[in-house]
Image: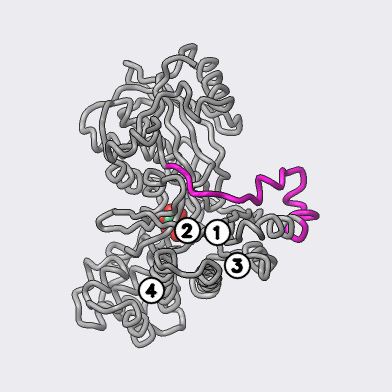
Amino acid sequence: MDQEADNGIKNNYPPVLQLQGSRLHNARATRLKDHFVAKYKQEPEFFVRVPGRVNLIGEHVDYCGYSVLPMAIQYDIVMAVKPISEPQLQLTNTDSSHSDFQCDINSFSIEVKKGVSPPWYSYFLCGLKGVLEVLQQVSVGMLVAVTGSVPQSSGLSSSSALVSAAALAAAHANNVKMTKLEIASVSAKSERYIGTQGGGMDQAIAFLGTKGCAKHIQFNPLQSEDVKLPDGAVFVIAHSLAVLNKAKTSDFNCRVAECRLASQIMAKKRGLSWEKLCSLADLQSAVRGSLDEMISLVKEFLHEEPYSKEEICCELEVSAGCLDQLSLSNNTTHISQFKLHQRALHVYQEANRVKAFQEVCQKDMETSAALSKLGELMGQSHESLRNLYECSHPNLDKLVLLGKGKALGSRLTGAGWGGCIVALTTKDTVSDYIDTLKEKFYKGNPAAFGRDLDSLVFATEPNTGAEIYEVNQM
Ligand code: GLA
């Protein structure tokens, strides 16, 4: 058995490997080490590597309590780390647009400014804070150099990879052993210090990803199972050339709030106690209905016209101040109109699509029938995200449209409002699909000038989750 497999099977902890002779022992890690040495005049003791992800289906449902189906990708965040005795954190990044940062490792604050993308090191501080809360003692100091290949603000989870890598680095530096599930939960919780109320998908796949299969990830409690994709399926990621940092606007948190409000109003209408009810999945458990029954409830209880804040207060019989406290977050209290019918409908229907996608992968179906069913589900998911959830972008819609007839199906992946699509193709059609997008979308597009098209549209395969690499000598 090879080193990686042996380590992975032995336990449920992120594997600790030897750098020497590993697949991380490459030119990139050497450059990172050189950057570390140039900055700190000493050698790193270990590296952590955490991948980005692409979500195949199940968008904007994790924070509602529903399962998702992502896979880890080949792009990742790598950190070179050395624990030190002084209580200091020093950070440097190989990307010179990310300035160096330092602070006391045990006392720092994470600044959240409205309308501004957080500085890169804030994501590190989130992961560190999560681990400090678990430690319940002071942390050792750390010198850290960071490099990343996950495209930023592109829906491929570069921020969660950074938060999760920081958590893993801090845990390892302090000799704290956390299982993959524990550290994924800590990372998911601590990323919320940046101000966005994401679910746990990105951090879960960052730790649980395995080579060769996608994962069906369920929440409350967090668990995952392998999903073997049909033979010949090839997923392609294509960048829309539009970016959005979800911590910069209130769009993401607004959707979270709309889903929460939808569940609370429906609960109240059903005569259930709604104040502590937080998610559409909680409502489903309380109602004990099927997803189809929940879809009928949405149609019966929630109107399609947007709800004003006053109407919501009236429905729930609370004051605006009380609503702010019970149901809204800092950056959503100013919002005056909420679409509850559309958001809840998307979530319950998307949860159904995740089930259907997983069933197709499990069934012994004829390959081409299986592939076209998966493509169809992906297409429906995109339509729903565009029309009901309103988190698409004209460029994403254009990419989906251009791929029709070339891919079996495609959809926006990640939070949306920009970023990437993921398309399902086959070994036989993948190059034609990629060439078509290059020709019709990227060539001649000013936003793609001077950029390597192979980094904007590329095939991807399910990859391994987070790992720690001990350094002997490089
Ligand atoms: C972001 C969040 C995830 C998930 C997706 C949308 O990536 O971090 O938790 O909500 O958006 O599916």
Query: Which kind of residue does numbered mark 2 sit on?
Result: Leu
Mark number for residue 348?
4
**Residue beneath label 3, please?**
408
Number of numbered labels in the structure image: 4
Cα gap from disc 1 to disc 4, whole angstroms: 27 Å
At x 41%, y 71%, the residue is: 356
Query: Which kind of residue does numbered mark 3 sit on?
Result: Leu
Residue 185 visible at all: yes
Query: Which kind of residue does numbered mark 4 sit on?
Result: Tyr
**Which residues are drawn in magenta?**
439-464
Question: Is residue 453 found inside the magenta-colored segment of the image?
Answer: yes
Q: Is residue 207 left or right of residue 252?
A: left
Query: Which kind of residue does numbered mark 1 sit on?
Result: Ala
The image shows residue 317 at horizontal and vertical percentages of 25, 78
Q: Nearer the viewer, mark 2 or mark 4?
A: 2
**Residue 295 occupies quadrant:** bottom left
Q: Nearer the viewer, residue 127 or 330?
A: 127
**Residue beneath label 2, please?**
229
Indicate which disc, 2 or 4, sits on the residue closer to the N terminus: 2
Mark number for residue 233?
1
Cα gap from disc 3 to disc 2, whole angstroms: 14 Å
At x 44%, y 24%, the residue is: 19
Cα gap from disc 2 to disc 4, whole angstroms: 24 Å
Q: Residue furthest bottom?
A: 300
> Do residues under tags 1 and 2 come within 8 Å of each other at their CB atoms?
yes
Q: Nearer the viewer, mark 3 or mark 2?
A: 2
Q: Is residue 89 above or below residue 333?
A: above
